[in-house]
Amino acid sequence: MSLSFLVYDRRFAPLDHWHRVLPDAHPCEVSKFQTAPQKGSLLWLSADVPDWQTLCQRWSDTGSRVLLLTRLPDPTEMNRALACGARAYLPALANARVMRQAAEIVGSGGLWFPEELLGSLLRLVSGALDQTGHPGTEADLSMLTAREHEVARYAAKGESNRAIAQSLGITERTVKEHMGAVFRKLGVKDRMQLMLLVTGQRPAGGGENVR
């Protein structure tokens, strides 16, 4: 089992909550944190930590998986977290289910971001790829059902589960079920990989059903 650390600043330290939702993480106030980066470990890092970007980059560069905890999710901060190698960006006061889901997805090699921000990120990356003028090879989606194909196309454009459900006249639960099937069949681990595959920027590969 991977080691898990929680690094925070005393200016914002809801330790009772973190003890409940991250029972396996070893908490440490940043001024006392002396642990060297360890490959494969999880670092839950509070965005209130001064110069969190440096710590995030240092741990990411050594193979650790950094999950940034923020008081208020913000697209600009999320982009900075990505640039520093963070694998997840989530609310510091998220519940245990969300924390567990993020840890599982990151542990399997995927990325986790709030759905309300994920769409803007996917659209940003997709737009950047379009501007390169070098379209990738068209993805083979023949293994998907007609409905799964529709869901995959919408998701790759950055649409939320709710938006997809409204566009197709189905429930969000049904959208999640279709997304699970899409991830399994295409071998992608998250929506970013799905977008890259659908736009022909990466080949399909083995993977598990994650976010």
Image (tube, rainbow, N blue to C red):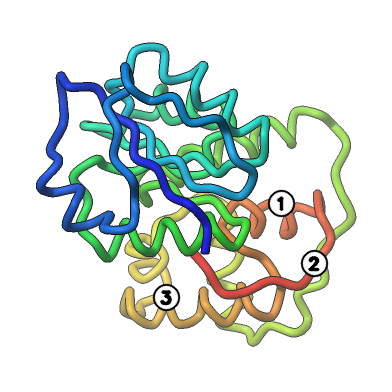
Q: CA distance from mark 3 to mark 2?
A: 20 Å
Q: Looking at the image, tell me whether mark 3 or mark 2 is earlier in sequence order.
A: 3
Q: Residue at x 32, y 37 (%)?
A: 69
In this rendering, is residue 194 above or below 34?
below
Q: CA distance from mark 3 to mark 1?
A: 19 Å
Q: Residue at x 40, y 24 (%)?
A: 77
Of the residues shown, which amino acid type is indicated by label 2?
Ala
Please provide percent x and percent y for residue 98.
30, 59
Question: Which secondary structure lies at badge 2?
Answer: loop
Q: Quadrant of residue 95?
A: bottom left
Please provide percent x and percent y for residue 152.
59, 68
Q: Callout 1: 10 Å neighbours few (<14), some, many (20+)?
A: many
In this rendering, is residue 115 above or below 180?
above
Q: Looking at the image, tell me whether mark 3 or mark 1 is earlier in sequence order.
A: 3
Question: Which secondary structure lies at badge 1?
Answer: helix
> Which circle marks residue 176 in the picture?
3
Marks 3 & 2, CB-CB < 8 Å contact: no
Of the residues shown, which amino acid type is indicated by label 1?
Leu
Of the residues shown, which amino acid type is indicated by label 3?
Lys
Q: Callout 3: 10 Å neighbours few (<14), some, many (20+)?
A: some
- Number of marks: 3
Please provide percent x and percent y for residue 211.
48, 64
**Residue of label 2:** 204
In this rendering, is residue 99 above or below 175?
above
In the image, taking residue 209 as reference, residue 199 lies left or right, namely right
Q: Quadrant of residue 24?
A: bottom left
Q: Looking at the image, tell me whether mark 1 or mark 2 is earlier in sequence order.
A: 1
Q: Residue at x 24, y 61 (%)?
A: 96
Please provide percent x and percent y for residue 186.
71, 73
Question: Which secondary structure lies at badge 3?
Answer: helix
**Residue of label 1:** 196
In depth, the one of 39 and 136 nearer the eye is 39
